[in-house]
Image: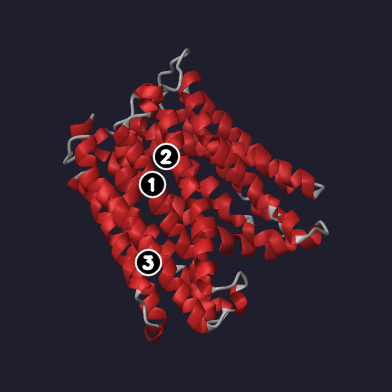
Amino acid sequence: MTKRAALAALTLAMLVPSLSTSIASVAAPTLAVAFDATFAQVQWVVLAYLVAVTALTVVAGHVGDTTGRKRLFLIGIALFGVMSAACAAAPTLGALVAARAGQGVGAAIMMALTVAFVGEAVPRERIGTAMGLLGTVSAVGTALGPPVGGALITAFGWEAIFLLTVPLSAAAFVLAYRYLPDAPKAPRARLSVAVLRDRARATNLLLSAIATTVLMSTLVVGPFYLTGALGLDAAVVGAVMAAGPVVAALGGLPAGRVVDRLGTRRTTALGLGGMAAGCLALATLPESLGVPGYVIPIVVITGSFAQFQAANSTEVVATAPAAGRGAIAGMLALSRQVGLILGTAAMGWVFTTAAGTSDITGATPGDVADALHTTFATGAALMAGALLLATVGRRVLSPMGENVATRV
């Protein structure tokens, strides 16, 4: 019961910040009207949160190693809950942005230390399954944000999307306080250069950033292809775009079990290879195949990413030294945030450049289709390089392990 309750605490602590990452985006039009603000001003409600999370995940993990993870974890959950209430009560847009930044600080602590706690709260032979579960919860939270947020805004107003996370944070706090173990702390711990320069670990972090970059490109490019090349309306686009998050949600836990059975290295290679194959399919996709031709490669990419993420996260956590596990978990979270940013900015640039215009809405269907092909040809090249690094490259960096235990 204690292990399950501890895992429930970690699950809630992953769900809440993931939900809050996407739920605010749907409120932008409503907030613009409520505060008589421009689109650019309202975007800071989303950006303030993301910037705080990106900037502080590594710091949060290291401070947790130094001061005690459980104490900081509880502070992070409490801060998130309080800032959620402050968001709902914000009288001005500036106050809302400030409260969202505070939420981001709490989220950075929660996201970094949730992963770090897996090593203490879960038996070693079940780490892969636990990481798969957390990946599932993260995907579910991100996917549920827009529809849940839209329903709450329609029924109760924009304040409701922030009030929703207050009781969830309270539940996570109670479970964490009662059931999470008191992880050992190192009062004089410093972020070891040797830990940061470990080549095998650096490879894991680089692979995480590359894979997340390619995954994010599906979310950035997909809507424009579906509307501009296939001529779908917004409602149908939303339904098609849901295929990826649904696969990630359904595949996370089975992916973790595969990791426990096959080991991290084999599962990592399978995931990266699947992503490369999916990108190659999109790079050569004929428009005549329509929606099914688009969805099948997306399902392959997303499902393969879930497989990769479970394996990669398991290896990072299981091989991290106990005294630096929080900082390393923070670095893993940071690598994903970097991937999200690169997927949006860099792959978005590839797409618009290939289309020959910065205004994609004015591009011809043929230009949009060509831009999709170029973008995912780039993605396929990135994933092929990642696969090469994960297999041939790591034979040079460290011995090839068949399971997590061989590298600890």
Q: Residue 22, image x and y in percent?
A: 57, 55
Does residue 273 appear to the left or right of 58 in the view shown?
left
Q: Residue at x 31, y 40 (%)?
A: 314
Residue 257 seen in the figure: no
Q: Is residue 119 above or below residue 301?
A: above
Q: Is residue 116 above or below residue 38?
A: above
Q: Are marks 3 and 2 in contact (CB under 8 Å)?
A: no
Q: What's the residue type where badge 3 is placed? A: Ala
Q: Residue 264, image x and y in percent?
A: 24, 44
Mark 2 sits on what residue? 332
Q: What's the residue type where badge 2 is placed? A: Leu
Q: Quadrant of the N terminus?
A: top left
Q: Between 81 and 184, which is closer to the camera in this rendering?
A: 184
> Separation of disc 3 and disc 2 at Cα?
26 Å
Q: What's the residue type where badge 1 is placed? A: Ser
Q: Secondary structure at mark 2?
A: helix
Q: Which mark is residue 377?
A: 3
> Separation of disc 1 and disc 2 at Cα?
7 Å
Q: Residue 32, image x and y in percent?
A: 77, 60
Mark 1 sits on what residue? 208
> Separation of disc 1 and disc 3 at Cα?
19 Å
Q: Quadrant of residue 206?
A: top left
Q: Quadrant of residue 157?
A: bottom right
Specify the color scheme: secondary structure
Decide which of tag 1 and tag 2 comes sooner along the chain.
1
Q: Which of pointers 3 and 2 indicates the residue nearer the eye? A: 3
Report crowding for label 2: few under 14, some 14 to 19, many 20 or more residues within 10 A (C-alpha).
many
Q: Between 10 and 361, which is closer to the camera in this rendering?
A: 361
